[in-house]
Amino acid sequence: MMNMRYLILFGTFGLCNLAAADTVQMMLDEYRQQGATDVKAQSAERLWTTEHTPGKGGQLRSCATCHGDDPRQPGKHVRTGKVIAPMAVSVNSKRFSDVKKIRKWFKRNCKWTLGRECSAQEQADILVWLNSQ
């Protein structure tokens, strides 16, 4: 009976990873249709740590401000103190399995961090980088 539980548990994780992989590929295809080319994880890593001023009197922010330098570790929202689950797919297999959530959080976080929406190229780069972590 115990072996069956492990089999079901590991099978579930495998399905989550497959679902996330399919979703990531679908999003990358969408970003390419919007003009993203030559997706580079290195560009995303720079974007992740580069500080931006998102508007008048805004404090310097980067993705790492809330998510931390290592996306495999939990983050903490700088204003609310809310713990943020790791962004890396290797640690959080459900992270990129829902298209609506991906769109919602890219839009919200890019506006908060950069003062604008991320381009299709930036989103593709970040998605590939986080998926590789």
Image (spheres, helix red, strand yellow):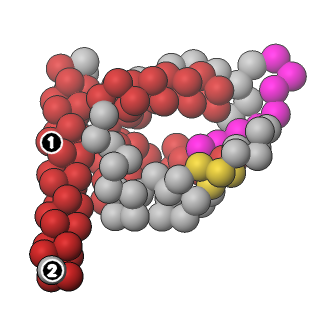
Q: Quadrant of the N terminus?
A: bottom left
Residue at numbered disc 1? 22
Counting from the top left corner in percent of width and height, residue 28 is at 22, 34
Disc 1 marks a residue whose amino acid type is Asp
Q: Secondary structure at mark 1?
A: helix
Name the residue located 30 percent from the left edge and 34 percent from the top edge: 98
Q: Residue at x 18, y 45 (%)?
A: 19
Q: Name the spot of residue 80 as percent of width and height, x first.
A: 77, 39
Q: Is residue 115 magenta?
A: no
In the figure, is residue 78 to the left or right of 4? right
Q: Quadrant of residue 34?
A: top left
Task: Quarter of the image for the C terminus: give it.
Answer: bottom left
In the image, is residue 117 above or below residue 59? above
Give the main secondary structure, helix, strand or loop, of the magenta stretch. loop
Query: Which residue sits at x=81%, y=26%?
Result: 58
Q: Amino acid at mark 2?
A: Met
Q: Tell me if 106 is positioned left or right of 102 in this view.
A: right
Q: Is residue 81 above or below residue 132?
A: above
Q: Say which element carries label 2.
A: loop
Tell me whether circle 2 and circle 1 mark residues in contact (CB < 8 Å): no
Q: Nearer the viewer, residue 8 or 15?
A: 8
Q: Position of residue 109 (x, y in %)?
A: 57, 30
In magenta, the rendered stretch is 56-64
Which residue is depicted at the point 38% across and 47% down? 95
Confirm whether residue 118 shows in the render: no
Q: Is residue 101 visible?
A: yes
Report the residue marked by disc 2.
1
